[in-house]
Image: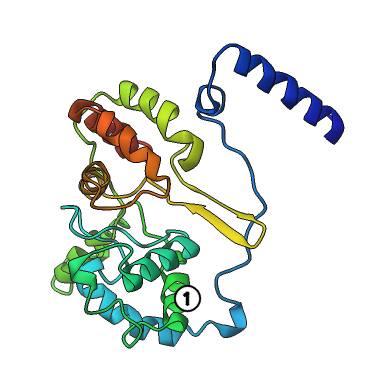
Amino acid sequence: MKLGEQGRFAADRHRRALRAGATCIDCHQGISHHLPSPPPLLAEKDYDPEEAEDIMEVCAGCHGDKGQGAPDGEYPRLAGLNAHYIARQLRHFKSHERINIPMIPYANERELPEPDVRTIATYLSRIELPTKLEPIEENEIGEGFDALARLEASKAVLNIPRYPGNVEAGGRLYRKECAGCHGLDGRGRVGRIGDRVWVVPTLVGQHSNYLLRQIRKFRKGERRHDRPEDAAIFRRFSDAEIGDLLAWLSVQDD
């Protein structure tokens, strides 16, 4: 369909929807629009992996040496998240637009200047967590087997346990309320609108208890959602519906 035809088609559909009393959400829910990709957060020539590893030593104390986070929900998985998203959250911590007590000593201009924000965000975005441990070869078992190393390696495996709840109901709720921004597969979206980078985080592969904590903060107004009007949607969800939503997200990597 040519551009002019697209415009006429869209105008006709909007007129019909308005006459029927429909809202934007009624028609556009669950639709994933594609935007031009933004430029890299940090040019390759400016990226220093050794500097990134030095910064990561500070982050690892809470988020794990691979950025895997903690299953109890206290610290999120950062590994593999979009670099633009990580950088934006770090800037929000620095400006106190997003309040997080454990981050206060680190998220300031002295400890984390803008070049470091870009460096660590790029570093974390490039980490690919394994989804299972490598099998132990028969000749590795014995006196020289490093059980501690095996235990540490297991902590970095990306494996989200199934959250209790109705998976099918959670999928329906997700497609209705969340997919339009976070993508039909729950893996987020990123694009460019003019000079502005528009990025929505992935939800799949994030620790369920961390997601639950964030939803509760959105409901209470303790954390600002990118769309402030969505706070009312979170308050409208029952606890059972939130459990169903988390159940659906928890099985998408199975």
The image quadrant of residue 17 is: top right
Q: Which residue is mark 1?
A: 118
Residue furthest out toward the top: 20
Query: Which residue appears at 42% of the width and 87% of the height?
Result: 51
Q: Residue 216, relative to residue 127: is it above or below?
A: above
The image quadrant of residue 102 is: bottom left
Amino acid beneath label 1: Arg
Q: Please indicate whether residue 64 sits to the left or right of residue 116 in the image.
A: left
Q: Residue 20, relative to residue 44: is it above or below?
A: above
Residue 153: x and y, percent?
Answer: 25, 64
Relative to the observer, which residue lies in front, 218 or 43?
A: 218
**Residue 254 seen anywhere in this rendered image of the structure:** no
Residue 3: x and y, percent?
Answer: 84, 35
Residue 243: x and y, percent?
Answer: 22, 32
- Element class at badge 1: helix
Locate the N terminus by quadrant: top right
